[in-house]
Image (cartoon, rainbow, N blue to C red):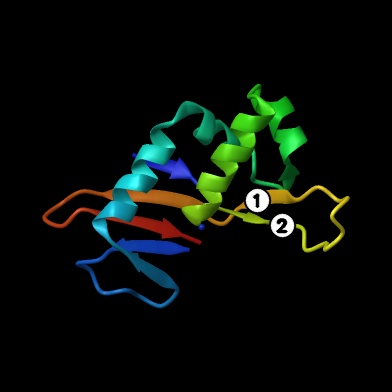
Amino acid sequence: MSTETGGTVAHETEPAKSGEAVVGDDDVGATLALLADEEARALFRHTGKPKTIPELTADCGVARSTAYRKVRKLTAAGLLEPASADDDPNTATAYQRTVDALEIIVGEAETIEVRR
């Protein structure tokens, strides 16, 4: 299974390469569960360029509260990041993907690699 997304996340049994973050089984499962969610995937797909929550709700057809909740989860999983560094509380935060490709390799040791 491949999903467009960039950084590398490897299963904890593999040595980390330069630029990779090593995660445990719980993080791998949480990432897979998050990307199994249709609304979260839609939000993720639409953040190739920085977008605010109102833009994402319009693009994806999800409720604003749902967008905020799922963007928080995608950000916590390291798949999105705030793109705007404006400290003005009146300016909406834009979010963008942190990854260009997501690759899941299943073999003797299951791995998830997120390549930047």
Q: Residue at x 35, y 46 (%)?
A: 30
Which type of secondary structure does the marked residue at label 2 adopt? loop
Mark 2 and mark 1 in contact (Cβ < 8 Å)? yes
Rendered position, 33 above or below 76: above
Give the mark count: 2
Near-viewer residue (116 or 58): 58
Task: Report whether residue 31 is seen.
Answer: yes
How packed is label 2: few (under 14 Cα within 10 Å), some, or many (20 or more)? some
Please state if 48 lies on the left or on the right of 17 as rendered.
right
- Return the disc, 1 or 2, that comes first in the chain's sequence: 2
Q: At numbered mark 1, what does the secondary structure look like: helix, strand or loop? A: strand
> Is residue 44 in view from this perspective?
no
Across and down, in percent, residue 93 comes to: 76, 50
Near-viewer residue (57 or 97): 57
**Is 88 left, or right, of 46 in this rendering?**
right
Q: Is residue 59 above or below residue 4?
A: above
Label 1 is placed on what type of residue?
Gln
Residue 98, horizontal then vertical, whole percent: 57, 57
Which residue sits at x=15%, y=52%? 107
Give the side of residue 2 with respect to residue 14, left or right: right
- Tag 2 residue: 83
Q: Amino acid at mark 2?
A: Ala
- The residue positioned farthest toward the left in the image shown: 108
- Which residue corresponds to the image point at 50% horizontal and 54% vertical from the top-left? 76
Q: Could you say which quadrant of the image residue 53 lies in?
A: top right
Residue carrying label 1: 96
